[in-house]
Image (cartoon, helix red, strand yellow):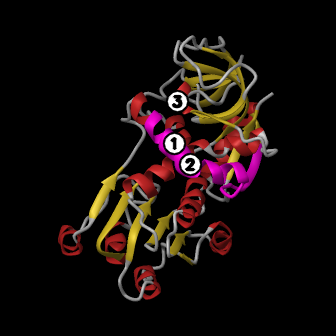
Amino acid sequence: MKAAILTGAGLEIRDVPRPDPKPHEVLVRVRASGLNRADLLMAAGRPHGNAGGAGAIAGLEWAGEVAAVGREVRNVKPGDRVMCSGNGGYAEYAVTDAGRVSPIPANNMSDVQAATLPVALQTMHDAVVTNGRLAEGETVLIQGASSGVGLMAMQIAKLQGAGLVIGSSTNAERRARLAEYGADLAIDSRDPNWPEQVKQATGGAGVDLIVDQISAGVMNQNMQAAAIQGRIVNVGRLGGFAGEFDFDLHALKRLAYIGVTFRTRSAEEVREIVRRMRADLWPAVETGALRLPIDRLFPLEEAAAAQTHMRANNHFGKIVLTIG
């Protein structure tokens, strides 16, 4: 099969053996694979948990039809259309744990549309609902809201009853579109006055929950914009991996600062994340209420170009590889 392989010189398309599913795994004939920021880190030589490294197949989410299942698998069968998260999605075939496989809804959802959803749904349900503990009527700020996961976070917050949803983007055109995906207010995180804008929008109280994909460079401003006893969930580090931290402000606000990642999760933990996500969100997925825009499609053979497009940071929504 053809696959996009991580090498010291970037991605290369190679012929590699088709994987065989282990007893608890599902083999999928991949039709589309979504790109994620973590893909760029792996291409730059930074492993993503047990994924990445020279010789590995890139890609963390995909959609297609089940080709084969391991002997312990009961939730899907060959021929089923599915969407998955896991490792090795930039390929004609990919395997993953059966607990990370979800059915593509029978509502005319395409493989391309389905491939945009697994990582965003799992990541942001875990951040907003499980770790963020969002309660009905609370206020939310999503930092980096124009990314695929950011757009999904705003929609999940609205679906869960948030009273006010604020999204940030450094691009004026993208900020103008955030309202389409649940934002009541859009801010520019490069504007030094954005914490004051958030306070004004919340009657001076600050936001109850911040889901942060930027981290370094905005951490102290996040704490300024947060309500007393608010929560900040560290999901991504687009602005850098280290920065200044005002410990006194953190104490004064009595904030909960929570870090999340899939890199150190066990298979059992990820299965539980998927189970919780589907319990809360799947009716909205099936009706199409939760959706992501598709920025651009690339064939598998142009996977390196697709990553270059993502690296330029001019996209809105998801970039997807089409395969076969």
**Circle nearer the N terminus (1, 3):** 1
Mark 1, residue position: 38
Give the label, 2 or 1, closer to the camera.
2
Q: Give the range drawn in magenta.
A: 271-297
Mark 3, residue position: 99
Q: Is residue 164 above or below residue 271?
A: below
282 in magenta: yes
SS label for mark 3: helix
Quadrant of the image occupied by residue 69:
top right
As rendered, which of 154 and 76 lies closer to the eye?
Answer: 76
What is the CA distance from the residue labelled 2 to the residue labelled 3?
14 Å
Image position, residue 206 (x, y; %): 37, 79
SS label for mark 2: helix
Mark 2, residue position: 121
CA neighbours of label 1 inside 10 A, class few (<14), some (14 to 19), many (20+) = some
What quarter of the picture does the C terminus occupy? Answer: top right
Image position, residue 234 (x, y; %): 38, 55
